[in-house]
Image (cartoon, rainbow, N blue to C red):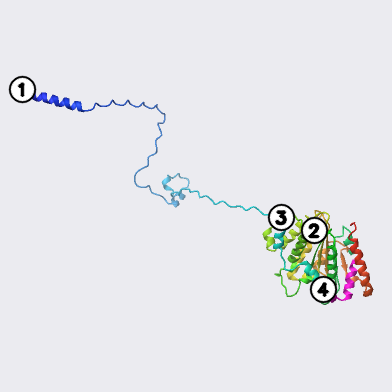
Amino acid sequence: MQDREYVEATMNQFRELIRERTPSPSPAPSPAPSPSPMLLGPWQPPTQAQGPPLPWYPPAYTQQYPYYMYPPYMYPPQQPLVWHPQPSVQVQPAVSPNSAWLQEVLYTPYSDDKDLKQVSDENDLISLRYRVRAEQVVSTPEFRDWAIKAKSKELLVEGNFGYDDCHYISALSLLCATLTQSFRTREEYISTVFFCGCHGKDDQDDDDEDVGGVAIMKSMILQLLKQHHLFDLTGLEKDIKLDSLKAGDIDQICGLFVWLVKRLPRNLMLVCIIDGAVHFEIDVFEDGLQKVIKCLLSLSKDNTVSIPVKVLVTSPIQTEMTGNLFREEGDDDDSRFISLESFPEINYLSAAIESDREMNEQMDAYEGNHE
């Protein structure tokens, strides 16, 4: 009996020892308040179905029944759209060309001064008969009207020297050289001249830089830039295609000439002279010559041009294409034509003295007021 009591007392002591060494449990947290009831319940992220991938049907099957709404797995998988930024294009600002740039683009291996000297040097090689006949031109009413009257702006002079006799420099070339040199002694005149006979040799072709209509226009533009240094070329690139201009496009070159003429001061007068036009009335040059003469004649009649523009074209023999350009349809006015074939035979020695006097009088008349 005593042993049983002893065992129970020992067990009670052991339980008390265990209870003392065991920490008391923390109080249980209060339960979270229940959310307010929702009509559709809270949003839950969609769960992805587990298992093998669903089959994919080829487009032929879906195209067979186009009006049936197929589940997504029946369409081919779509690649995600990826945006690739495009490189920005750097736009270079347009730069207006200047006179130096134009002179470089329109460079020609010759100059009008060189041609004038070449023509003057051949003065003694031309017979007195032809020289006197050419100098008679200045005493004709048609030439006086062209030189003095504002309404008379175009003049075509055709000689009768014979193609073999005149070669490439004729007596009319001497007349054109004399007129040009006289004009350039007066500040109110700007004169451009081109001698086709100096550049129309038979051994040259259409690719040469100093022949054809392109050569005529380039030369005249360079003469404009040389005689008038105050051109404002701002905005030229908007009206003229500079790339085509550099490539030698005759339409753009003619357009540049017109563009420059329209910007000359009102107190000036422009005289454009083409000598020996018949030398360019051949297949390789005719188209360019036609465009140049059309450009000059149109410019002389343009009311938007603020200055008088006078055009003189000469030829040692009768022309075809050039004469047709001067003859407007239905126009019977012959005041724009001079034919040396109609001149009477005269004493050439006395006529030479008289022609010199007439020419001096005509040059003096240019200084007067134009009607």
Q: Sort mark 4 into few (<14), some (14-19) or many (20+) by Cα contacts within 10 Å.
A: few
Q: CA distance from mark 3 to mark 4?
A: 39 Å
Q: CA distance from mark 1 to mark 2?
A: 150 Å
- Disc number at residue 299? 2
Labels 3 and 2 touching (C-beta < 8 A) = no
User: Is tag 4's residue or tag 1's residue first in the polypeptide sequence?
Assistant: 1
Q: CA distance from mark 4 to mark 1?
A: 166 Å
Which residue corresponds to mark 1?
2
Q: CA distance from mark 3 to mark 2?
A: 18 Å
- Disc number at residue 72? none
Query: Which residue is painted at 43% across and 45% down in the image?
Result: 72
Q: Please tell me whether mark 2 sits on a helix, a strand or a loop.
A: helix
Query: Which residue is painted at 45% across and 51% down in the image?
Result: 59
User: Is tag 3's residue or tag 4's residue first in the polypeptide sequence?
Assistant: 4
Q: Nearer the viewer, mark 4 or mark 2?
A: 4
- Disc number at residue 236? 3
User: Is tag 1's residue or tag 2's residue first in the polypeptide sequence?
Assistant: 1
Examine the rendering and report whether any part of residue 214 can be seen: yes
Instruction: Using the rendered view, name the quadrant where residue 186 is placed.
Output: bottom right
Q: Position of residue 12 (x, y in %)?
A: 13, 24
Residue range corresponding to the magenta coloring: 124-139
Q: Is residue 125 magenta?
A: yes
Q: Is residue 265 magenta?
A: no
Q: Nearer the viewer, residue 199 or 32?
A: 199
Which amino acid type corresponds to the residue marked 1 in the rendered image?
Gln
Which residue corresponds to mark 4?
121
Q: Nearer the viewer, mark 4 or mark 1?
A: 4
Which amino acid type corresponds to the residue marked 4 in the rendered image?
Asp
Q: Nearer the viewer, mark 3 or mark 4?
A: 4
